[in-house]
Amino acid sequence: VVLPSGVSAWLGVPFAAPPVRDLRWRPPQRVAAWTAIRHADRFAPECLQPLRGDRQNHYFGVEATSEDCLYLNIWAPAAAHGAPVIVWIYGGGFTIGSASMANYSGEPLAREGVVRVNIAYRVGPLGFLALPELGRESGNGGSGNYGLMDQIAALDWVKRNIARFGGDPGNVTIVGQSAGSMSVALLQTSPAARGLFRRAVGMSGSPFGGMLGPAPLGVAEAQGLALEKELGATSLAALRALPGDVVAAAKTPRDPIVVDGQIVTGPAERVFADRGQNDVPVLIGYTRDESFRPLGPVADRAALAAAVRARFGEGATPAILAAYADPDAARAAANIARDSTVGRQMTEWALYQARYGTQPAYGYFFTRRQPYAPGITFSDHDPATVGAYHSGDVPYWLRTRPSLNLLRPTRAWESGDVALEDEMAAALLAFARTGTPASPTIGRWPTFDPAAPRLVRLAPASAVVAWPHIADMALFAAPAPRTPTRPRD
């Protein structure tokens, strides 16, 4: 399809065989070859998943879902030849997500000379179930991580085929947000992904920091057996015979990522310390108001002290309150919630890359609160309190701000938003082309240096600043629960 912008799009391109029936919970298989013309003019269904609230009001919109979902979408500029490739990996807590939502469109960046690819992967228990019987069937003792295998299969497809669409298979940058960012970090640690990408961009999520690291195989398989019991199945064959939507709706809690020994070989910290990572440049960061484990309503410093004591214990409380001494108790609470979760995840990723890698790390801190139209209030997005929320940076990086208003006509964009989008998209494009982010206001971004840690604060007036609270994040070293409350996005 040639779009009015001149960008060519190929939508719903299969990169693996449908993972259905006997292929459910198996590594993705190669697509059967075809000789007839295949139409690539519409998106494929998103991977089977539970609905999340009112889909009319969510970024995904109303999309078809199917267990037959291993497809990708490609956007390429006219007459592209050897262009850098940017591959997007969606987030959604490894339970939901779509390669086709408007907020992730590849058309805007393709207009600026890169080939953009969005890949799909299995989510929820259909993508991340571990079971002893699956381990025996695999031949290597491991199970789980099928969604990560899908990502690797898609990247392998890109390496083998993207030159036909004008892309350079030797210059692939993987980019993800939230669970997509965690996926990027896991791919950096995975021996199975070696050689499939040259650069990595992570936005608000990683397995570093003790919050969402991969579960031991035995733990994940026990969780899988509990899910099997919930569904009333007595064997793997019985599980495969169940309707996919029944499996997707299972409620038994699970750690989605598991140390299976093949795709995920250990905690990210250990892989990096052993210098076993895919050593590539990384551009990583987070937003000011990440809200994975909020401390709850905090009206004053006394309430803040009580909330910190309840969360982190009596011994840690004085040091945390001293480090986060903002007189606005609600602001201090938000900073603590952020830095004890996503802030620490991204900071430790940068520290480990700097300590054990030969390639540079670059950091950012997104602080722009999107401007809402007057009188807008809805669900948990109160314009007065939502702040620079989790995923709020995505439309600036991908130049998809107008797409938000297709499904949520709530934003009243200002000239500063246009300038910020120019800043962020330019940095991403420069990173994909050269390995060094550069943008109109900042110029070349500073390399992360643990001795003098700085990052780029992204706002209508972007600037290079000290990495906020970087030394204080060590106060949250005690492991937090594996499964956070769902962030607002």
Image: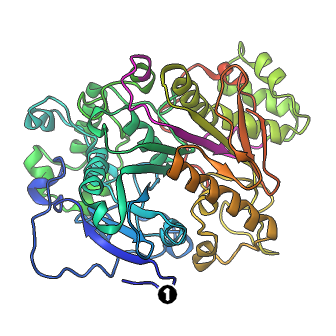
Specify whether 50 is left or right of 153: right
The residue at 42%/27% (across/down) is 268
Q: Is residue 14 visible?
A: yes
The residue at 23%/50% (across/down) is 231
In this rendering, is residue 362 above or below 477?
below
Percent of width and height locating residue 475:
68, 19
Please provide the residue range marked out in magenta: 272-297
Quarter residue 43 falls in: bottom left
Percent of width and height locating residue 193:
30, 40
In this rendering, is residue 274 above or below 76?
above
Q: From this viewpoint, which residue is outermost toward the top? A: 315
Front residue (pair 394, 169): 169
Percent of width and height locating residue 378:
68, 68
Which residue is label 1 attached to? Answer: 4
The residue at 53%/47% (across/down) is 434
On whether residue 288 falls in the magenta region, the answer is yes
Specify whether 301 is left or right of 281: right
Q: In what element is the residue under mark 1?
A: loop
The residue at 51%/51% (across/down) is 432
User: Magenta part mainly helix, strand or loop?
Assistant: loop
Count the marks: 1
Quarter residue 285 falls in: top right
